[in-house]
Image: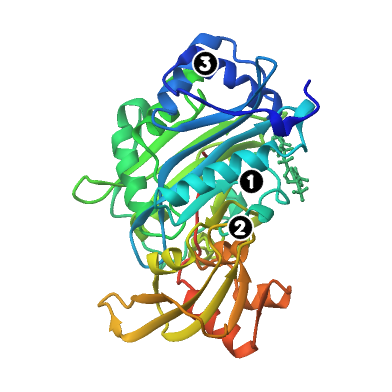
Amino acid sequence: MSADSGALPLRTVDPADAEAVAAWSRVPQVAFMRPAPEDAGRAALESVERMAGHRLSGVVDAGRWVATYRSFDSELTLPGTGPVSVNAVSTVTVLPTHRRRGLLRRLIGEDLRRARESGHALAVLIAAEAPIYGRFGFGAATASAGLVLDAGAVRFRADAPGGSGRLELVEPALAWRELSAVHDAARRARPGGLLREDVWWRQWTRPGARGALGPQAHVVLHRDGDGRADGYAAYEVSEEWAGRVSRCSARVLDLQALSPGAYRDLWGFVTSLDWVRTVHAADRPVDEVLPLLLEDPRAVQRGAVDDFLWVRPLDAAGALAARRYLGCGSLVLRVLDEDGPAAATVRLHVDAQRCGQDGWTCAEVTATSQEPDVVLGAAELGALLLGGVSAVALAAAGRVAGSPAAVQQLQSLLATPRAPWCPTWF
Ligand SMILES: CC(C)(COP(=O)(O)OP(=O)(O)OC[C@H]1O[C@@H](n2cnc3c(N)ncnc32)[C@H](O)[C@@H]1OP(=O)(O)O)[C@@H](O)C(=O)NCCC(=O)NCCS
């Protein structure tokens, strides 16, 4: 073990080289406390398939990988606009023998510099532990909720939409293109949505234990009156009996719907499965509509609400200009980003005259030497950009500075009708 990790050079890995990828992948196995794969050769080939075109780097000490880092180009849906290209960060691991010697700092610093130079305005990641990434300018921008449903108490209100389509149990490996098309439309319609590439779907739906969906999973597809897929639910059922009394539960692994009818029908389906008394769902949006459709909204209990997608502006003006706004007004923002690329003072101007027919307006964002109305860090701007975090709350926490009127105006400008949601692990 080297005493001076600072002297250890950063290395890159060819993501197409299965042997090199297998050696590199031993670090995340240790750091994420995962068992070594039973078939290391096949696992390496699957990694190569999944990580084609990704940027793999890390640190080697005495001929052995001791740190890993991966980034790739993805797409994130911003408020009021379509997806924008983002630098997605993953597989950040350092062996326990080499932790807290600055390896992560060096790897992430190098990658974020490169991402900024290549024109990305934003980077995103999912944080294993919340205290790690604020110091690197990332803020938690989406939250997800766990739900527990009392299936026996789920009764839909008479005015709930639904019932016009049809449901079909499908073979996931055969139906993945239809599932992917539904998800793709859904992720474009809500801030926080992330691209799932074809390889994601192929690996998710691969039959048996090799598929990320798992061998117990079922997938039900919803078709509209014209036969077009407009929703799906993936779920699995766990069998448990107390004597002859069922205690079986279902777990919703993913549920996406493009219409209120499909949404209601799919939840109706998973809560009316024979034997199933309780339905669990993880990583759901915090503004889930389901309770509002029920005669007894308490049939849906919300469990823990956790941060999910963390966003980091790499270019403050570019990030603010990439989304659109519902309100109008003008504010000077100073973004603080010590040693980072997002430090800037910009005027955010949203002019009602430029409002589109859909009610959203593009902002003019220009560098200025004016005194700021609001001062905030890069991590706070990252948290605010998708509209899921309140600027007023961050100001109350001492993390955004400005007069109450200016902070409130910032909050009105950034707010979005639907909570940002990202259910895609990467
Ligand atoms: C998290 C991990 C990648 C950190 O790597 P590292 O090389 O030890 O990090 P660094 O030495 O570069 O630390 C940089 C800074 O982050 C802080 N930090 C690192 N990990 C932290 C953690 N888990 N909690 C709080 N702070 C952390 C360090 O204290 C240091 O702070 P400082 O600059 O104020 O002194 C590593 O500990 C690890 O692999 N953990 C297990 C897997 C994991 O959680 N990976 C993250 C996946 S998102």
Residue lying at the far left in this picture: please name it: 226
Query: Of marks 1 and 3, which one's residue comes earlier in the chain?
Result: 3
In front here: 406 or 172?
Answer: 406
Q: Amino acid at mark 2?
A: Ala
Left or right for 49, reference 140? left
The residue tagged 1 is 127
Position above or below: 373 against 92: below
Q: Secondary structure at mark 2?
A: strand
Residue at image x 56%, y 46%? 125
Residue matched to label 3: 20
How far across and how far down the image is residue 15, in percent? 45, 24
Q: Nearer the viewer, mark 2 or mark 3?
A: 3
Q: Amino acid at mark 1?
A: Ala
Whether residue 379 is situated above or below residue 13 in the rendered picture: below
Alpha-carbon distance for marks 1 and 3?
Answer: 26 Å
Say whether disc 1 or disc 2 marks the residue closer to the N-terminus.
1
Q: Is residue 365 above or below residue 223?
A: below
Query: What amino acid type should be assigned to the residue bearing mark 3?
Result: Ala
Kindly tell me whether mark 1's CB lies below 8 Å from ligand 1: yes
Location of residue 321 in the rendering, given as x and y in whole percent from the top left corner: 39, 69
User: Tags 1 and 2 in contact by the CB under 8 Å rule?
Assistant: yes
Q: Residue at x 49, y 19 (%)?
A: 210
Q: Quadrant location of ligand 1?
A: top right
Is residue 351 rendered to the left or right of residue 239? left
| Residue topped by disc 2 | 140
Mark 2: few, some, or many residues within 10 Å (few <14, many ≥20)?
many
Sooner in the amino-acid sequence: mark 2 or mark 3 = 3
Q: Position of residue 146 (x, y in %)?
A: 62, 51
Q: Tell me the quarter of the picture where residue 188 sits.
A: bottom left
Distance, label 1 to label 2, CA atoms, is 9 Å
How many labels sit on residues? 3
